[in-house]
Image: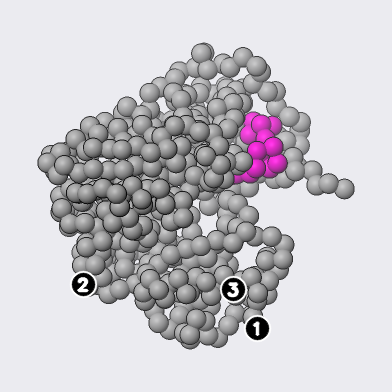
């Protein structure tokens, strides 16, 4: 008998609830979840609206209408954004407009057949795990009681408040940046928006600062050109070619489908690792912008970030995967900066959730002020603080791979990639601390059927070898 996919429970991973459209994600389940959010908002912040937005994905706008109708059925006002809205723009709007919550219809960097929902707390960061579990239970009870009424063929958006969220966000970002330095530098940025919601935001902000911006893949294609809107190195080949073809002070930037993740390419067409880009941001903000309050990073982030932060007198705390605990550290004041291995970054002066638009703009500011190409700046950081290379990869997670990985986690090796295993941590997948100061980490994705591979090694060549070894060990098991 075929599995009834509509009966699958709604479960939030590290970056929201997601599923293949029509097979894991459907409008009935979206309505149930939105209704639960509406009831929660009415109880915890009576009178406050819920912000509902969507990205550029196929049927995302319709799903947002369904969610909005379910929230209104709970007696809660809905505030809608105009058009497709990037996640960082929406998160900031939730806080600034004193909303009870934000419902963001997006599947972020997942392939185009996915759709999903992210939820934002009133402070502008992720909801706590406790609240998410409550909403999961309420949504399950609503589904069991029968489907909620659909929004109907006529959208009700004309009866709701629709707000320009991009304008205030861009204005705040421009005021944050060193506009004079950006204007004087005659900097050129090539920005790849991956057909996502970042188009018209990052390029607009930098343009207002006098930066020449060449926008690529800025059209809102709901299928993202047939590929996942995830700015990983293989997908950045067009951006790399564009950087190599030019001259002068140049920078390549990219954001994922909802623009909460970023990637950077230097003037020579080299893709910066997420950890290297984060190290540059921490160094810039501590040395030039006076950032204080510590740095919160994930356990899969490279050690160069930690050494750079400590050289500026910033304490460092490490957390598990996902940005939720990093945002909590920012909200509590334990950290002023936060970042992770998958392209997430936040500065509490502007945001407490990851913001790829902010990160890209600050890298442009660093380049404009220092006039030092990013690869040279990285070389200097490594000279002062020690070399390391950190990166990630992924494998499709099917039943056979899951079984082999389970056996690996039960009996991890005593040596890996030529180094002695100092410690094995099974709290989330399998993480091995290695004798050369690096690590390797296998863990199941919280947002799609994939096995994530993370590693750190003493050099880029050693990192490539280590990730390949991690892939082989997961696929073939111990021999």
Residue 26: say if magenta: yes
Which residue has dot 3 on it? 472
Q: CA distance from mark 2 to mark 1?
A: 40 Å
Name the residue: 59% across, 26% down. Answer: 62
212 lies above or below 352? above
Q: Is residue 11 left or right of residue 169?
A: right
Q: Secondary structure at mark 1?
A: loop
458 lies above or below 306? below
Name the residue: 71% across, 68% down. Answer: 403
Relative depth, front residue between 479 and 225: 225
Which residue has dot 1 on it? 479
Q: Is residue 95 left or right of residue 445?
A: left
Q: CA distance from mark 3 to mark 2?
A: 34 Å
Name the residue: 64% across, 21% down. Answer: 151
Relative depth, front residue between 69 and 305: 305
Which quadrant does the C terminus fall into? Answer: bottom right
Circle 3 packing at 10 Å, graded few (<14), some (14-19), many (20+), is: few
The answer to which image quadrant residue 92 occupies is top left
Residue 384: mark: 2
Q: Position of residue 83 (x, y in %)?
A: 46, 25
**Does residue 331 appear in the picture of this structure?**
no
**Does residue 19 appear in the picture of this structure?**
yes
Q: Position of residue 6 (x, y in %)?
A: 74, 40
Mark nearer the N terminus (1 vs 3): 3
Part of the protein shown in magenta: 16-32
Relative depth, front residue between 185 and 405: 185
Q: Secondary structure at mark 2?
A: helix
Q: Secondary structure at mark 3?
A: helix
């Amino acid at each position: 008998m075929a599995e009834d996919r509509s009966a699958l429970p709604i479960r939030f991973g590290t970056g929201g609830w997601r599923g293949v459209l029509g097979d894991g994600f459907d409008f009935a389940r979206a309505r149930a979840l939105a209704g639960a959010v509406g009831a929660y908002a009415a109880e915890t912040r009576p009178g406050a609206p819920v912000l509902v937005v969507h990205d550029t994905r196929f049927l995302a706008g319709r799903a947002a209408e369904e969610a909005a109708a379910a929230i209104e059925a709970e007696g809660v006002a809905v505030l809608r954004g105009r058009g497709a809205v990037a996640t960082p723009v929406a998160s900031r709007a939730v806080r600034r407009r004193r909303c009870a919550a934000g419902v963001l219809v997006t599947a972020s960097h997942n392939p185009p057949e996915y759709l999903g929902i992210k939820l934002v707390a009133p402070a502008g960061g992720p909801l706590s795990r406790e609240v998410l579990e409550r909403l999961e239970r309420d949504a399950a009870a609503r589904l069991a009681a029968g489907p909620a009424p659909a929004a109907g063929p006529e959208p009700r958006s004309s009866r709701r408040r629709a707000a320009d969220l991009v304008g205030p966000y861009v204005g705040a970002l421009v005021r944050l940046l060193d506009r004079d330095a950006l204007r004087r530098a005659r900097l050129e940025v090539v920005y790849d928006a991956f057909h996502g919601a970042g188009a018209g935001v990052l390029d607009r902000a930098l343009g207002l600062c006098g930066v020449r911006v060449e926008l690529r893949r800025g059209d809102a294609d709901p299928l993202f050109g047939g590929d996942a809107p995830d700015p990983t190195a293989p997908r950045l080949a067009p951006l790399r070619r564009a950087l190599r073809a030019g001259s002068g002070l140049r920078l390549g930037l990219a954001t994922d489908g909802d623009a909460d993740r970023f990637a950077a390419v230097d003037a020579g067409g080299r893709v910066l690792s997420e950890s290297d880009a984060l190290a540059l941001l921490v160094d810039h903000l501590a040395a030039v912008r006076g950032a204080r309050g510590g740095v919160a990073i994930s356990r899969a982030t490279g050690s160069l970030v930690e050494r750079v932060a400590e050289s500026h007198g910033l304490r460092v705390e490490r957390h598990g995967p996902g940005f939720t605990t990093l945002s909590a550290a920012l909200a509590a004041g334990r950290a002023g900066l936060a970042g992770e291995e998958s392209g997430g970054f936040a500065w509490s002066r502007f945001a407490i959730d990851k913001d790829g638009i902010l990160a890209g703009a600050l890298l442009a500011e660093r380049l404009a002020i220092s006039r030092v190409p990013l690869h040279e700046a990285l070389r200097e950081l490594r000279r002062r603080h020690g070399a390391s290379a950190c990166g990630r990869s992924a494998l499709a997670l099917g039943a056979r791979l899951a079984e082999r990985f389970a056996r690996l986690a039960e009996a991890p090796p005593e040596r890996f990639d030529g180094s002695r295993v100092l410690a094995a941590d099974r709290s989330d997948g399998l993480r091995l601390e290695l004798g050369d100061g690096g690590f390797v980490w296998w863990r199941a994705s919280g947002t799609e059927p994939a096995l994530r591979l993370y590693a750190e090694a003493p050099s880029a060549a050693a990192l490539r070898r280590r990730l390949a070894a991690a892939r082989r060990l997961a696929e073939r098991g111990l021999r």
